Image: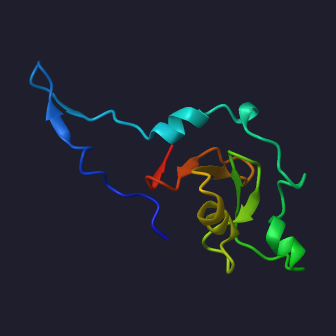
Amino acid sequence: MRIFRRNPEDRSETSGGGVATRSTNRCEELDIYGVDSNADPAPRAGDLAACEECTQLGEHHWAHLRICLSCGHVGCCDSSPRRHATAHFEETGHPVMRSAEPGEVWRWCYLHEVTG
């Protein structure tokens, strides 16, 4: 599973003082959703500890869970057999999800393949 991808526009540049700096271009979608987990939607099915589709199929084994920051859909990650979080993005186009695992706050933009 690929988590990071280098953006060709994200390269070192020299500032006016001659110091090499990194480009600060960020993913617009990650900026829109911000980093305040209190502003995230509630789990659509009411359970942040279960993949919606796996549960409907009677399955209760997945690697990790992700929550869609557009609608609150909770799906299993790409390390899980059915990859329901990615399938949700492919079906809806909702661009950003975050880890639903306790203690994890990172977010992922499917469009730009970057974390934030």
**In terms of depth relative to the viewer, which is nearer, 51 or 19?**
51
- Residue that sits furthest to the left in the current view: 18
Residue at 16% in and 35% down: 13
Please say if 35 is above or below 97: above
Residue 66 placement (x, y as % from top left): 69, 57
Task: Name which residue lies at 30% across and 51% down.
Answer: 7
Percent x, y for residue 18? 9, 24
Q: Where is residue 15 in the image (x, y as percent from the top left)?
A: 15, 24
Depicted 71 relative to depicted 39: above or below: below
For this view, does 89 lie left or right of residue 109? right
Q: Is residue 66 left or right of residue 95?
A: right
| Left or right: 28 as drawn, with respect to 70 | left
Q: Residue at x 62, y 52 (%)?
A: 94
Q: Where is residue 23 in the image (x, y as percent from the top left)?
A: 27, 35
How does the figure colour the protein chain or chains? Answer: rainbow
Q: How many labels does the image show?
A: 0
Question: Residue at left 88%, top 55%?
Answer: 47
* Residue nearer the viewer, 7 or 87: 87
Vertical relation: 23 (above or below) 114: above
Out of 20 and 41, give the one closest to the viewer.
41
In this rendering, the answer to whether 109 lies above or below 84 is above
